[in-house]
Image: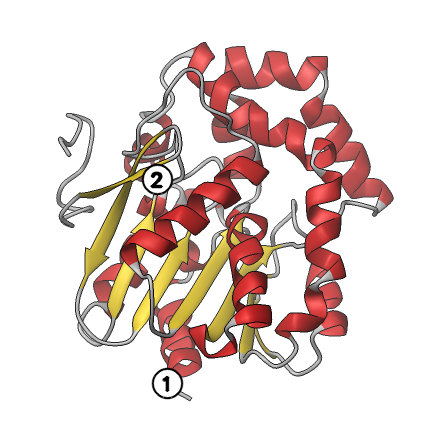
Amino acid sequence: MTTPDWLDRTAWPFEPHAAPVTDGRLHFVDEGKGPAVVLVHGTPTWSFEWRHVIAQLRSTHRVIAPDHLGFGLSERPATANYSPEAHAARFREFMQQVLPSGSVSLVVHDFGGPIALDWALECALENPQRLRHLIVVNTWMWPFDDPKMQHAAKLASGALGRFLYRHLNASQKLLMPSVYGDRKKLTPAIHAQYLSVFPDADSREQVLFALAKALLGSRPFYESLWQRRAALCDVPMTVMWGLKDSAFPPTMLQRWKGAFPQSKVVEFAGAGHWPHEEEVEAFNAALHTALNP
C-alpha cells in the first residue's frame, strides 16, 4: 500500500500491509515475532494511536494493529457500511486471514471494544484457548443507559451532531482535545496525523458520524455483547483506565469491575481517554506486566 504525503514516517516507521475484506482493503501493521498481540483502535483515530505500544512490544511480541475500513490508511469505499456491526464483521474476516489460528492477546480501546469484543466473545465460547489475554482501555460493551451518556449520545447522533461532525469536524477538533487529561499532550504534530485522515465533510459524515449515530442506533448490537459477557469470566483480563476521561468517566470503569471482578485494574490518574498516548511509559510498563504475568 502507498503511504500519503501527510504521514509522519518518523513517528510511524512501520511497514504497511493490506488485507482484503468485505467492501475494501484494511491497512495493518505486523511487526516483530513472538506471542501475538492485536491492538484495536476506536474513533476518531486510527492505529497511529498505538505507535508507542508497537515500538515497545515488537522486540518481544508479534504486534498487529489494523485500521478499520475508512480510517487511517485503509480504503474508504463510498458504498461501504460503517456501522459498528459491519466493522465487527470485517474484523472477524481480518482475524481469519491474518491470524487464523493460535492464541492471541487482544487490546481494545474506545469503539474498538464493541467492534473486536464480538470476535472475542465468539472465541471464548467456541475456542477458549484462542484468547490468551484481554486488555480493555477506556471502552464499553453495553447499551448506553446512563442518563448523562444517553443525553450526550443524543446530541452527537442528531441533526446538530451531524452538522458539527460534517462541517466543523467536531469529533476531532472539539471532542478529541476535551477528553485528554492534559490537552497540551495533543500537540499540533500529533493532532495533524488524525486530522489529515478526514480532510473533507463527506468523509467525516460517512465514517465518523456513522459511529456517532451508532451510539444509540446500534443498541441491539451492544445488548448482544452484554448478554454474552459471562463467556469472558474465565479469560485473563486487565482493565486499563485513564481517570480524567470526561467522555468515559470512572463510572464506566466501575461497571467493568462489577461485571468482571476477576480482572486486574490499572488506573492512570493523570490521563484521559488515551492513556497509551498520554502516559506512555506507565502504560507500556503496565501492559508488559499484563502480557507477562
Mark 1: few, some, or many residues within 10 Å (few <14, many ≥20)? few
The residue indicated by pointer 2 is: 187
Residue 35 lies left or right of residue 180; in this view the side is left
Mark 1 or 2: the one toward you: 1
Q: Return the x and y of residue 162 as percentages of the image width and height.
A: 62, 16
Q: Residue at x 43, y 17 (%)?
A: 203
Q: Return the x and y of residue 190 as percentages of the image width and height.
A: 31, 39
**Separation of residues labelled 1 and 2 (CA atoms):** 32 Å
Q: Quadrant of residue 229?
A: bottom right
- Disc 1 residue type (three-letter): Asn
Farthest bottom residue?
293
Q: Residue at x 55, y 76 (%)?
A: 237
Q: Residue at x 36, y 55 (%)?
A: 96
Q: Return the x and y of residue 123 as percentages of the image width and height.
A: 52, 67
Q: Return the x and y of residue 271 as percentages of the image width and height.
A: 52, 58
The residue indicated by pointer 1 is: 292
Mark positioned earlier in the residue sequence (1 or 2): 2
Residue 194 visible in the displayed image: yes
243 shown above or below 196: below
- Disc 2 residue type (three-letter): Thr
Residue 149 lies left or right of residue 2; in this view the side is right
